């Protein structure tokens, strides 16, 4: 059964989508069969793997709300071995529509049960909120990765996220683990980053990945080409660190 991992943090701009796309592509590069599930109405993970949002007719919205089987929505991407369930702006409505639906928290889990055996990893890109979409992602997952930006107030909001994780563990998904906290967008030229690393490590201890993601312009350029960095510029620092991270995730299980 594929290991399902949600990339979650209700803060925007911390590197969730960049991590989802690039970890998925690096796992695929390492020979794993991977499904990337876009759970953000912005659909940036969708376009980041080369799917034109304008061409998408059925998406994660139809799976969650219209009970369309997941297998009919899965498509190929710009990366060999990497498949995706796309999202479009229609998903914005699902956050509200789900609230009044039966089994609202377990709809993603149920929908993916049919396809989980076909993949080694299923990576879920969460939206920047702790609403029904993120709850569905955490309920479906074996583990989560929490990207934390190496910036002022890095730890702000994390207690809210951790209490949501604990609530899901208690009531919806006993198996959910925090695979790790990922430090992102480190600017090696400032002392601030070093302070944030120390602070986050003090709080999360051995839950922090050894790999730290630096700021790398290739990582921010790649999405506009519909390519993960490992294809856009395989020799870049961004490609190197996400490959390292993918290996850490494989070792963890
Ligand atoms: P989120 O999904 O948490 O909102 P994104 O992954 O979309 O965050 O990242 C926010 C912005 O920062 C994007 O424009 C992205 O290209 C850029 N970005 C993310 N990680 C890096 C990095 N390591 N180096 C440079 N730019 C980055
Ligand atoms: Mg995002």
Image (cartoon, rainbow, N blue to C red):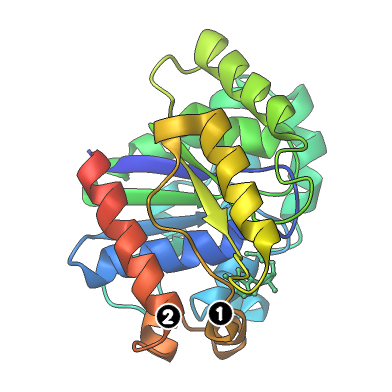
- The structure residue drawn at horizontal position 72% and vertical position 60%, both measured from the top left corner, is 13
In x, y percent, where is residue 140? Answer: 46, 32
Placement of the N terminus among the 4 image quadrants: top left
State whether residue 249 is above or below residue 167: below
On the question of residue 52 being in view, the answer is: yes
| Of pointers 2 and 1, the one earlier in the residue sequence | 1
Question: In front: 128, or 178?
Answer: 178
Q: Check disc 2 and report its element: helix, strand or loop.
A: helix
State whether residue 148 is above or below residue 204: below
**Disc 1 packing (10 Å; few <14; some 14–19; many ≥20):** some
**Horizontally, is 132 left or right of 177 in the view?**
right
State if disc 1 and disc 2 touch (CB < 8 Å).
yes
Residue 216's mark?
1
In x, y percent, where is residue 49? Answer: 49, 75
Q: Check disc 1 and report its element: helix, strand or loop.
A: loop
In x, y percent, where is residue 5? Answer: 42, 42
Placement of the C terminus among the 4 image quadrants: top left
- The structure residue drawn at horizontal position 43% and vertical position 14%, both measured from the top left corner, is 174
Image quarter where ligand 1 lies? bottom right
Give the quadrant of residue 131.
top right
Residue designated by label 2: 237
In x, y percent, where is residue 71? Answer: 38, 53
């Amino acid at each position: 059964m594929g290991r399902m991992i949600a990339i979650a943090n209700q803060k925007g701009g911390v590197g969730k989508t960049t991590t989802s796309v690039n970890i998925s592509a690096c796992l695929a590069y390492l020979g794993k069969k991977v499904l990337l599930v876009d759970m953000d109405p912005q659909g940036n993970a969708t376009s980041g793997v080369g799917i034109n949002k304008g061409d998408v007719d059925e998406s994660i919205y139809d799976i969650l709300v219209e009970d369309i089987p997941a297998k009919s929505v899965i498509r190929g991407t710009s990366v060999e071995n990497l498949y995706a369930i796309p999202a479009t702006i229609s998903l914005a409505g699902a956050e509200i529509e789900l609230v009044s639906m039966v089994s609202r928290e377990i709809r993603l889990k149920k929908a993916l049960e049919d396809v989980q055996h076909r993949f080694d990893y299923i990576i879920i890109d969460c939206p920047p909120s702790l609403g029904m979409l993120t709850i569905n992602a955490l309920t479906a997952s074996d583990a989560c990765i929490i990207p934390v930006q190496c910036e002022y107030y890095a730890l702000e909001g994390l207690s809210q996220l951790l209490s949501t994780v604990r609530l899901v563990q208690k009531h919806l998904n006993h198996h959910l683990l925090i695979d790790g906290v990922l430090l992102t967008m480190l600017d090696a030229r400032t002392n601030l980053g070093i302070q944030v690393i120390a602070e986050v490590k003090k709080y999360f201890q051995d839950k922090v990945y050894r790999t730290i993601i630096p700021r790398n312009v290739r990582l921010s350029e790649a999405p506009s080409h519909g390519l993960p960095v490992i294809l856009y510029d395989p020799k870049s620092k961004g490609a190197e660190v996400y490959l390292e991270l993918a290996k850490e995730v494989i070792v963890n299980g």
